[in-house]
Each structure stands twice: as structure tokens, then as C-alpha cells.
Amino acid sequence: MENEPKNLSDDLKKAGILRLLTLVLASVGLTVSARSSSFPSRALTARAQGISFLLLFFAFIFELVADISLISILHDAALLNLKRGVSVKALGSSDKQTSTPSRQPGRALLNRLARLIRDPLLIILSTPISYAIEFSGFFNIVFNLATRVSGLSIQLQPLLSTFSMIVPISASILLGLSQWSESTAVRGSLESSCTSVWLEMLKEVRVRLFVTFMIILFIYVYSISLMPISLTPSTRAIDILADSLYFGFELGLLASLAFLLMLLTLFRDFIHLVCSREQTQESRG
């Protein structure tokens, strides 16, 4: 058990490096696919799209491995802190009041997750934006192969109709993110540190998620008016890329929200267990 904090810290660094590698591969893959749209040779374009697909595919796999590892690391950190008897008051306190990260990486991970709930910038930096780049690259490959290589035309209206479901699905996920059930809070102990920390996090989560959703909704509604409604062999490469980014970022948004849902659900369950334990100790006392 003594080596568990160090192992968690090392695993977190590995997951971070893997995420960085994923972002680089995804960016290169999307760039290769976009640049090859202007190649004069169909054979050369098809070959470049194949290379781009391999880069994006490996980026997608690496991203999955990194995010699964991160969720597992945070679960282990929560379990380690439960064994050591951490309190919600300590978890919600400032960094100056907690132990140094080098001495207690398990506590540091959970403190970082607690700060993520309050800070929208940390949420943006922590969610896997690589998914949006990867899906955009996949769409760009399909559009280029259909128009540049096969000489086909693609009507985007059916695809837009299908993707219109992204908005209610996103709203449902965001609603799930804000469901910090009242039954999870400590009952019969209104002055408890658990209750105050819980209510503070509940307010911050809902405010941040509402603002985030309204900004995203505005961006997507405005973007629809700028998209070409069909893609043909004569469509400019920049227009194909713009459509790919639109659809790719919608799917990337869902992937990022699902990942964030896993993190916040983990933290909610952790607080529930700690508060229940503290309530039991108060009752016995």
C-alpha cells in the first residue's frame, strides 16, 4: 500500500504522455487528409487518405487507452483515500491546507478532480478534445474519397437531419452531469461539512454546464448557415474541411461529455461514501 500513491502518480504521467501523443497523431492525420484534397492525382489522393486513416485510427485507440487508464487511476485514488480515512472537508479545502502532491498523489488526484468541477478552464483542458479532431479527420477522409477519388456528389441534408439529434442528446448528457441527487447528501446534519461542500459543488456544476451548453448551441446553430448543403468533385478543399469539422466536433462533443460524465459520477459516488461514513461516525459518537 505504501507504493500505491507513487504508482498512481506514475500512471497519471503515462496517461498524460499518451494523450499528448494522441493529439499529435490526430492533428497530423487531419492535416494530411485536408492537404491531400488538392492533389491533382486521384491515386495519390487515395494513398494519402489511407495514411491519414491509419494515423487517426491509432490516435483513436491511444485516446481510448489513455482515458480508460485515467478513469481507473481516479478510481484507485478514491479507494486509497477511503482506506486512509480522508474527509470531505479536507477534499474541499485549498491546496495550502492539504498535503503536498509529492507526498500524497492519491489525495492530489482527487483535489484536482474537485477543482475541475469549479473551473471551466480545467474542464476544457481535461476533456479529450482529440476525439473532435479524430472524428473530423474520419469525415474528411470519407468526403474526399467520395468526391475527389470516386467523383460522387454528397447531399448533406440527410446527414444534417440525423445530426440534429446531437442537440437533445447533448442536453440529456449535460442534465445527467448535473444530477447530484439530494438523497446523496447527508441527512439530518445540516451543519455538516459534507452538506456545505455538497451544495457548493451542486451550484457550480449546474451553472458551468448551463453556460457551456448555451455557448455550444449558439456556435452550432450559427455554423449551419455557413455550411455548403452539398459536396461535389468541384467543391473547394476548405469547404470539405469545414463540413468535416462541423460533424466531427459534434461527435467529439458527445465523446467528451461521456468522459466528463464518468469523472463526475466517480466523484459524486466518492463524496457519497465519505459523507455516509462521517455520518455513521457522528451517530456512533
Image (spheres, grey):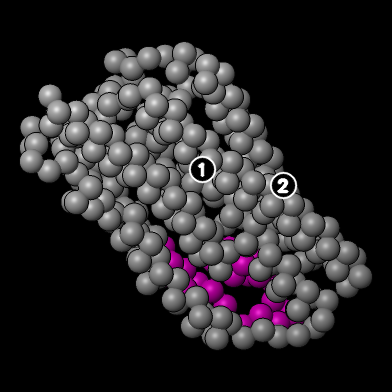
Q: Tell me the crowding category of disc 1: few under 14, some 14 to 19, or many 20 or more residues within 10 angstroms, Cα based.
A: some
- 2 or 1: mark nearer the eye: 1
Please state if 257 lies on the left or on the right of 235 as rendered. Answer: left
Residue 50 found in image quarter = bottom right
Is residue 131 one of those drawn in magenta? Answer: no
Q: Is residue 229 visible?
A: no
Q: Position of residue 236 (x, y in %)?
A: 69, 71
Marks 2/1 in contact by CB < 8 Å: the verdict is: no
Query: Which three-letter amino acid code belongs to the residue tagged 2?
Result: Leu
Query: Which three-letter amino acid code belongs to the residue tagged 1?
Result: Ile
What residue sits 64% from the left and 57% below the top?
Answer: 134
Q: Is residue 259 above or below residue 224?
A: above
Residue under numbered circle 2: 25
State which quarter of the image contains the C terminus.
Answer: top left
Q: Position of residue 44 (x, y in %)?
A: 90, 65
Numbered label attached to residue 71: 1
- Which is more toward the observer, 152 or 114? 114
- Which is more toward the observer, 55 or 35? 55
